[in-house]
Amino acid sequence: MQNKLPEYSIKDINLFKIGRYKVLWALQHMPVVNYLRNIYSKEKIFKGYRIGACLHITSETANLILNFKKAGAEVYLCASNPLSTQDEVAAYLVKQGISVFGKRNESSEEYYKNIENVAKTMPHFIIDDGGDLITFVHQNQKYIRNVIGATEETTTGVIRLKNLYNQKLLKFPIIAVNNAKTKYLFDNRYGTGQSTVDGLLRATNILIAGKTVVVCGYGWCGKGIAQRFKGMGGKVIVVEIDPIRALEAIMDGFSVMSINKASKIGDIFITATGNTSVITMKEIKKMKEGVILGNSGHFNVEIRMDEIEKNTLRKRIIRDGLTEYFLKTGKKIFILGEGRLLNLACAEGHPPEVMDMSFANQFLSIKFLKENPYMEINVHNVPEEIDKQVAKYKLNTMNVKIDSLTKIQKKYLSSWELGTL
Ligand SMILES: NC(=O)c1ccc[n+]([C@@H]2O[C@H](COP(=O)([O-])OP(=O)(O)OC[C@H]3O[C@@H](n4cnc5c(N)ncnc54)[C@H](O)[C@@H]3O)[C@@H](O)[C@H]2O)c1
């Protein structure tokens, strides 16, 4: 079994030392993950189990992976995006005895090879972000034999896996970690909101105040992105296809219009829809000279990079994470992180405080699958007791006490007659 990638020489003290400090710093802001580590590393509850994970290789992920290792599991990790791996974190994990298959800026071929490397370890549990590892073992069933169940981290992955289930092809139960309230209300909203602004700033260092920012998609990610750009003085326009979410955006104080109209006005465009072809050459032709385009949705299909490439005379990288495209039409545009999720490609992804809750859900959901190995083959939500438990742990670590229902309140809420006190 490959235990480390040749790219990561453990003699490279500096690389893994930087990684170590980053991982420890993140852990200080992940008290729930740390709490679970302290409990379950004593009990070694995953002894004898192999876990295959396909996640963004960041400091926060490292802490989740170390939790499983310390709880007795053998863990194999590959990246869930070719541009999101933090090499110093990967090097640190290798030093800790984790098999890591992934490096920053890997080719598409290397990316899928690394997914296969993890599949080859015949995992008992899979942790996925986007569905690539789970779909890979379904397409290559020789690797599926031992899988008891899996978890999925993101909206796009949950949609793909529900489609697999609807086509009667799903072979093991999935827990949709994304659908836990302690995940999407915080990670998707505040995490993607802040880290998308962070990615744009690191790649451009421009002033947001006074700029017109078009946010495509007003789901949990879009809400966070719109809110944060507004907070920094941006004039935010929302583009939606769902009438209810469009109304929500209006009442939250944003302008809402079609992509056609917004294309002519925006300075910065951010997609977060989980859909394809939101910005194509048709829209780009209407845009102003020098616009900045970025995507925070899971896959790099929201902005049609293939169309842009075909319509480009030449391009150049002008800063880390920022490419200038000279289009055949004579216009130039700027693309963040090659159209891949920019909060990870141009920054470091979500802050540890929100990943603390997402990854506590991951850890407890894999534990739940282990304790309930004969769950119906379907895409399940995270059990409510786990979701609530994560919220309680988080509040405890923040030293926040909340009230509970009094007897009289419980009785009132469970009655139907008027006049019950
Ligand atoms: N960058 C990150 O770190 C990160 C974190 C979490 C989720 N995600 C990804 O971000 C994407 C969005 O996730 P979410 O949780 O906000 O999903 P969501 O389902 O809550 O929201 C998506 C919204 O986009 C809208 N939409 C769909 N097609 C559209 C179109 N053509 N034009 C305008 N709006 C359109 C939908 O109506 C919906 O309101 C997914 O791909 C998800 O996997 C990324």
Image (cartoon, grey):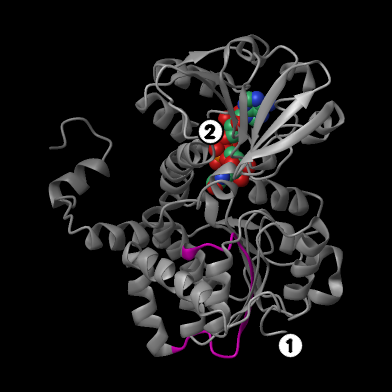
**Amino acid on which disc 2 is placed:** Gly
Measuring from the top left, give residue 266's x and y in whole percent: 57, 16
Between circles 2 and 1, the one closer to the viewer is 1
Q: Residue at 16% of width from left, 51% of height from top?
A: 403
Q: Quadrant of residue 25?
A: bottom left
Quadrant where the C terminus sits is top left
Q: Residue at 52% of width from left, 35% of height from top?
A: 204
**Amino acid on which disc 1 is placed:** Met
Main SS, magenta region, reads loop
Measuring from the top left, give residue 245's x and y in whole percent: 52, 24
Q: Quadrant of residue 415?
A: top left
Q: Residue at 56% of width from left, 62% of height from top?
A: 86
Measuring from the top left, give residue 84's x and y in whole percent: 61, 55
Q: Quadrant of residue 296?
A: top right
Question: Ligand 1 is in which quadrant of the figure?
Answer: top right
Mark sitting earlier along the chain (2/1) = 1
**51 relative to 390, above or below:** below
Range of magenta residues: 44-59
Task: Look at the numbered disc 2 and say if its residue's Cβ is closer than 8 Å to ligand 1.
Answer: yes
- Residue marked by disc 1: 1
139 to the left or right of 22: right
Label 2 crowd bin: few (<14), some (14–19), many (20+), radius 10 Å: many
- SS for dot 2: loop
Q: CA distance from mark 2 to mark 1?
A: 42 Å
Q: Is residue 55 magenta?
A: yes
- SS for dot 1: loop
**411 relative to 249, above or below:** below
406 to the left or right of 317: left
Q: Which mark is residue 219?
A: 2
